[in-house]
Amino acid sequence: MARIVMKFGGTSVGDIERIRTVARRVSEEVADGHQVAVVVSAMSGETNRLVDLCRRVAPMHDAREYDVVVSTGEQVTIGLLSMALQDLGVEARSWTGWQIPVRTDGAHGRARIQDIDTTDLIQRLEQGQVAVVAGFQGLGETDHRITTLGRGGSDTSAVALAAALDADRCDIYTDVDGVYTTDPRIVPKARKLARITYEEMLEMASLGAKVLQTRSVEMAMKHGVRVSVRHSWPEYWTVPGTLVCSEDEIVEKELVSGITYSRDEAKVTLQRVSDQPGVAARIFGPLADGNINVDMIVQNVSEDGQSTDLTFTVPTGDLDKAVGLLEACRDDLGFRHLTSDSNVCKVSVIGVGMRSHAGVAQTMFQALAERNINIQVISTSEIKVSVLIAEEYTELAVRALHTAYGLDAA
């Protein structure tokens, strides 16, 4: 007998028939003798509807009341799924975040989980009852008010619950049957990975892959939770998904495991910046104060040899705000010109095998050069190489790199 946490997203519980389908899948695990906790999202489109209601009532709404409203979507789902399970003869009970409780900090709308009290939950699981838990929500540590974890928070809820329950694994059911070497919509020959390391999955999630939410992977890696990505449709239930696990569980490590891309990038270049200590700190200070995340950064000596040019990327949605903040500080920062470009894309090559193999970057640069794709910015880490290119070359670059690293399926 195993203890399993199963998570189903909004599309998996999008209507009554799909909720019944989820109930059948859960009942199969129960019939196999497993202890099961299920974490669910709101029904597809429901959270967007609730967010829209908040904005229409008060554009500058109270974040605490916002959490009260948007957390109700999950409450509906857990009640309906519990009913569906009971209709199948499975003993089940719904749990909201505050009933468990899932304790979080007080950052309403983007709270972080601090602790989960699983005493009552474990007692019910050991009695054979299925726990149906609302994802995305918790209880504020100081004000004891409902909090939400931000978009994609149900993945984080599931992994955190699996860690607190010391579950054997956490199954994330979604609309794909696993993690692929790249987006199959761009590269039909993309292969599904049987296993992938936490580090690789974290890089892929943060660099554009939409399979798992970044915070959930971070938590899984921190607590050693084995996560299985599986398809929620019945015809895939017997098909193995992709296991996200520690590097020790993977005997043969691929040189490159995947190619990702992110179109949510915009490039900012400051020309003729004073070449003096502290200037970079003054440039990025206003951006940090504005909660703008800066990613790729490169600095070059300007043509006059007395100043530098500084280029970096920000999320596309933050470009106008970033430009406004920098222009407001132009006199203090001392740059001559500011240019920006939102028609760019970040393409990344990821793999733990890079740690022990040379020439990975050279292969990437060569493959792009052969297709006349110009590299604008480069950044690296121990297990990834990312380049910024013109957005129009995204698909060509992804296909070329997928072939260059031998990832195409036979």
Image (cartoon, helix red, strand yellow):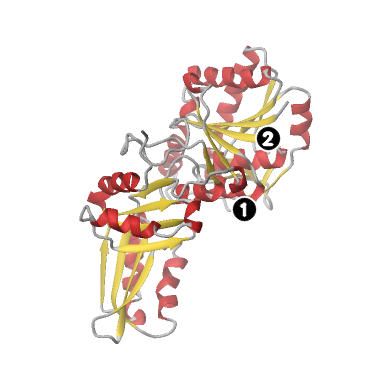
Which residue lies most toward the left here? 372
Three-letter code for the amino acid on which mark 2 is drawn: Asp
Q: Nearer the viewer, residue 354 or 269?
A: 354
The residue carrying pointer 1 sits among few (fewer than 14), some (14 to 19) or many (20 or more) residues within 10 Å by Cα, namely: many
The answer to whether residue 71 is left or right of residue 120 is: left
Which x, y percent locates residue 189?
A: 34, 35
Which x, y percent locates residue 201?
A: 50, 46
Q: Which residue is drawn at 32% across and 44% down?
A: 403
Can residue 174 be seen here?
A: yes
- Relative to 293, say whether 208 is above or below: above
Q: Which residue is drawn at 60% across and 24% down?
A: 79
Can residue 293 be seen here?
A: no
Circle 2 SS class? loop
Circle 1 SS class? loop
Sequence-earlier tag: 1 or 2: 1
Three-letter code for the amino acid on which mark 1 is drawn: Gly
Which x, y percent locates residue 212?
A: 50, 41
The residue carrying pointer 2 sits among few (fewer than 14), some (14 to 19) or many (20 or more) residues within 10 Å by Cα, namely: some
Mark number displayed over residue 106: 1
- Relative to 100, say whether 87 is above or below: above
Question: If the image is split into quadrants, where does the C terminus sit?
Answer: top left
Question: If the image is split into quadrants, where does the N terminus sit?
Answer: top right
Q: Which of 206 and 258 is in front in this view?
A: 258
Q: Name the residue under label 2.
A: 168
Disc 1 from disc 2: Cα separation: 30 Å
The answer to whether residue 255 is left or right of residue 267 is: right
Q: Which of 194 and 41 is in front in this view?
A: 194
